[in-house]
Each structure stands twice: as structure tokens, then as C-alpha cells.
Image (cartoon, rainbow, N blue to C red):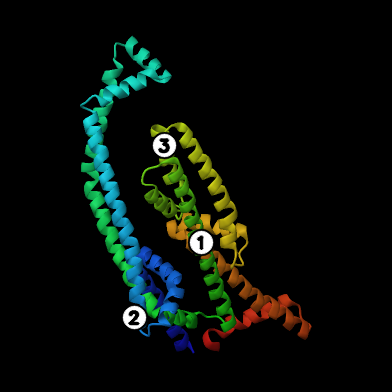
Amino acid sequence: MDHRRLFVFAFFALLAFITYELYAVLAPFLTPIAWAVLLAFLAHPLLLFLNRRLRSRSLCAGIITLAISLGVIAPAASLSAVLAREAATLYTNLSQASGKDDLAHATTWLANTRPGAKMSAALARRGIRLEDEVRSVGIQSVKTVSSYLVKHGGAAASNVASFLFHFVIAMLTLFYLLRDGEAWYDGLRELTPLEEADKLAVFESLRLTLSAVMRGLMLTSLLDGVAMGFGYLVLGAPYWELLALLTAAAGLLPIGGTALIWIPVALYLGLTAGWSSAILLAVWAALVLAIVDNIIKPLAMGRGTTLPSVALFFGLAGGVQAYGPLGIFAGPAVIAVFASLLRVYRRTYIEDSAVTAVSSGASPSEVIIEESTTIVAAGPRGAV
């Protein structure tokens, strides 16, 4: 018996060591792997639909992976081209404005405003001309932009290369998850040390929670993009289609959200079309976000999951703090699994013990203590 216990101890010690080493090996790729798992979960119904028409599981997985890759690469390439073109145009305009009459027009406009007139008078008392200060600020701005581009150009290229590498890892993982994920899922369920009914409860709770979170995020981000895109179109914002797409994408972010897009757009409209347009966009954004975030999102996320709204809220907020952007999904998933395990514990150790106590005449606490002592004394597989 001592040899048996020594073998069990050595086995679990080796398993813990190899598990830690496995984590060290996979740690650099955990983020793309996690995104691949979420995408596979989201694309699984489509996989089943295609597999009913195409016999090859590998072909179905390849089609979905290729479609998702193109769906990410094409908008990203288009957005990068637009941003690069606009950045070059802005830099050219700043360079030209610093050496021509545009700064004189800007100085005249600034001097005609009340704050500008006070600033000009204050500078004149010190023997400083407002025109000289505006020109100095313009030239310094161009120099700052140039030095920033030179300093951070290499880092930006490195970040792009890192993103492409992790994107390839994510897509490769997605393909294998779509092709073989069900077998891996069944194997994980078999390794879970619970009764079959308890396994079903835990995994079903996890599935429902992830589905609810994904459904809520996708629906609300789509509504945010459509509604704000309509506002951009009506108020005359340039590139309103691209801005609508960026607003929808920003709606998926845990911090900042759609405000990262519509606030700069409102400032642009205020400077170019008048502050009434900026105020109208801000009011429209507040109305849209109030309806979508406070009414539609809780309904979409709450339907299909047994978690109360407060638990779902803390799962989202705490998950972001603990795991970053992936915490949007990981936080509610942890709470859902914890709640399922509590229900398993209640059914296994509370309700069953109470039934046993009633039938034997002993109190439930005495039965739980007796069962716990028996389990500890028995050891693995009942060895003594």
C-alpha cells in the first residue's frame, strides 16, 4: 500500500511539473489561442451547417478559417491605407502651413476671438507678437511630428510584425479547433472528475454564458455602429462608412468603447462645421448608448444564462481587470463555472446528506463529517 501511495504522489508531482512547463511553453501564445477558442465557439454552428452539405470536415474548417482571415485582413488593410494617406496629408498640410500664409490666417482668426484678443494684449505688454508665437508653435509641431515618426516608426513596424505572427497562430489554431475541437471537448469532459450529470451542468452553464456574452457584445456593437454611422452621415462627417465600422469595432473594447471614435469626430465637426453639429452628435451618442448599453445589452446577455445581472456585471468588470480584453469572456465564464460547482456541491454534499440523515435518523452535519472522514481515510481508489 505504501508503494501505491508513493506511486500516486510521484505521478501527480510529475503531472504538476509537466503542466507548469507546458504553461511556460504556451504562455507567449495564450492570447491568440484564447481568441481562436472564442472564434471556434462562435463559428461552430456555421461549421455544422457546412458539414451537412460538404462531407469533408477539413474542407469546412478551411473555408471558415479563410473567410474569417479575409474578414479581418481586408478591413485592416483598407483602414491602414486610409490612415497612412490621411497622416501623410496632415503632415504635408502642417509643413506647408508653417511656411505660408495659412498661419497668418490662423493668427487673424485667433486674434478676433475674445480669448485670442486677451492673449495678444498680454503678449504685447511683454513685447511679444502673437504672430511670432503662432509661427513658432506651428514649426515646433511639425518638428515634433517628424521626430515622433522617426522615433516610433521601427516600433510600429515591429508591432505590425508581431500582430501578423500572432494572427497566423490564431488562424492555425482556429482551423484545428474547428476540425478536431469536438473530440478535444469530449476528451476534456471525460477527464473532468465529476458525475455525468454534473459534467453536463458545468459545461452547459459555460456554453450558455459564453453564448450570452458573445450575443450581447456582437448585437450591441452592431447597433452602435449602425446608429452612430447614421449620425455621422446626417451631420456630414467624412468617411462616415469607415467611422461607423470603427465605432462598431470600438464597441467591443472594454475600456473607452465607442467614445474613442465619436468624441474625436464631434471635435472635428465642431472645428469645421460648427459646434452645433458637435453638440447634436454628442446628444445622439448619449441617447444611443443609453438605450443600447442600459436596455438592449443586459437583455441580450441575460437571456440564456442563469447568472443574475449583478454577477454578470462584476464578471465583465472584474474579468477585464484580471485578464485584459479577454476578460470580457473569461470573467463571466469563471463566475458561471463557480456557480455550477456550487450547485454540484449542494446537490452532492448537502441534499444527498440530508436525505441520508433523514433515513438514518442522524443529523446532516454528522453524516457529512462521517463521509468526509471515510473519504480521507480511504485515499485514492479506496486504498488504505
Q: Is mark 1 on a helix, strand or loop?
A: helix
Badge 3 amino acid:
Leu
The answer to whether residue 383 is visible is no
Above-or-below relation of 179 to 323: below
> Nearest the camera: 30 or 235?
235
- Which residue has dot 2 on it? 58
For mark 2, give the secondary structure.
helix
**Circles 2 and 3: CB distance less than 8 Å?**
no
Q: Name the residue under label 1.
A: 331
Looking at the rendered image, the disc whose residue lies closer to the viewer, 2 or 3, is 3
Give the image quarter of residue 62. bottom left
Q: In this view, does 241 lie to the left or right of 206?
A: left
Q: Which of 123 and 362 is in front in this view?
A: 123
Q: Earlier in the sequence, mark 2 or mark 1?
A: 2
Residue under circle 3? 269
Q: How many marks?
A: 3
**Image mark for residue 134:** none
Q: Is residue 250 above or below residue 383?
A: above
Left or right of 121, for residue 90: left
Q: Is residue 323 visible?
A: yes
Residue 34 in percent (x, y) is at: 40, 66
The quadrant where residue 40 appears: bottom left
x, y percent for residue 45: 46, 74
Separation of residues labelled 3 and 1 (CA atoms) = 38 Å
- Measured Cα–Cα span from mark 2 to mark 3: 50 Å
| Identity of the residue drawn at 77% across and 85% down | 359
